[in-house]
Amino acid sequence: MASPDQKIIDQILQLKEQRRAVILAHNYQRPEIQDIADFVGDSLELSQRAAQTDAEVIVFCGVRFMAETASILCPDKVVLLPDPNAGCPMADMITAESLRQEKREHPEATVVCYVNSTAEVKAEADICCTSANAARIVSQLPGQDSILFVPDQYLGHFVATRTGRSLILWPGFCPTHVRIRREDILQMREKHPGAKVIVHPECRPGVIELADEVLSTGGMIRFAQKTESRELIVGTEIGIIHRLKKENPGKEFFPAQERAICPNMKLITLEKVLFSLREMSPEVKVPEGIRLRAKVAVDKMLQAT
């Protein structure tokens, strides 16, 4: 007899075919959500994948700003976010109006906006960046430019140390990544002295200083496949451990901090994915005026990398 989960999965797969849908899951999603997805990856990678498919419907298993980015890049597709409450606290730490005020105070500044932000905030930016390409984007800006980096102060601090550029930093942060402390890394190194430490650049500077590699989630996936180290201490949201173990069965992965959990990422369940496909709701649609302005900043990033 099929398990309740398997029955739901069967219904999801059937509806997915009927709706001509593609299911995208971020690396931090629940294991069962990652396992039913057509693509698992970071937010921008997933939106780019969606744009390349002939799917008519995108079921984005992530948080709202990710679904918005898919809507920005794929205006002809229906974008569904299975739980409308799946937001991002860091993205909510800045608004379009507060950014406009900051721009008035620094009228000469080039605004570099991390993709972990709302469509309205992206629309106020000059260029977007990801955690993987932020340093490269900033280093390519003219040397005389004043640079306003929003909304993540810790990613901005990391970029400043890597590029030598002086940045005006917005005081936002990821509540999940700041749970990872310097003490956690030191304790895990004691327990696993042969392990490599990989951490996300959204972590605090004291954590980054102790890492062997500072990587985006996509970078972590690639590093784990290539490294000869058999043990890795992983400093990011613990959902990525499922994929790392699945793709590297001969290696061991240890979360730097067991409490590094994003509750918003865990809101999406199999039942919600099924409901979303059945009802074609909740839909995320970025208004055209905002979409076009935000797309300019996203396109500039894509052209620069």
Image (tube, rainbow, N blue to C red):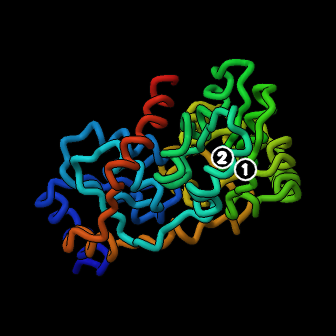
Q: Which residue is mark 1?
A: 170
User: Residue 21 sits in which quadrant?
Assistant: bottom left
Q: Residue at x 73, y 50 (%)?
A: 170
Q: Residue at x 46, y 24 (%)?
A: 303
Q: Earlier in the sequence, mark 1 or mark 2?
A: 2
What is the crowding at mark 1: few (fewer than 14 residues within 10 Å), some, or many (at least 20)? some
- Which quarter of the rendering shows the N terminus? bottom left
Q: Is 18 drawn above or below residue 151 in the view shown?
A: below
Q: Is residue 238 visible?
A: yes
- Compared across the picture, whether 296 is left or right of 105 comes to left
Percent across and percent down for residue 55 are 20, 47
User: Residue 263 sits in which quadrant?
Assistant: bottom right
Q: Amino acid at mark 2?
A: Val
Give whichever of 242, 182 is nearer the camera.
Answer: 182
Percent across and percent down for residue 156 are 73, 41
- Compared across the picture, whether 203 is left or right of 17 comes to right
Q: Amino acid at mark 1?
A: Trp
Give whichever of 32, 247 is nearer the camera.
Answer: 32
| CB contact under 8 Å: marks 1 and 2 | yes
Percent across and percent down for residue 71 are 34, 50
Q: Which residue is mark 2?
A: 150
- Compared across the picture, whether 234 is left or right of 209 comes to left
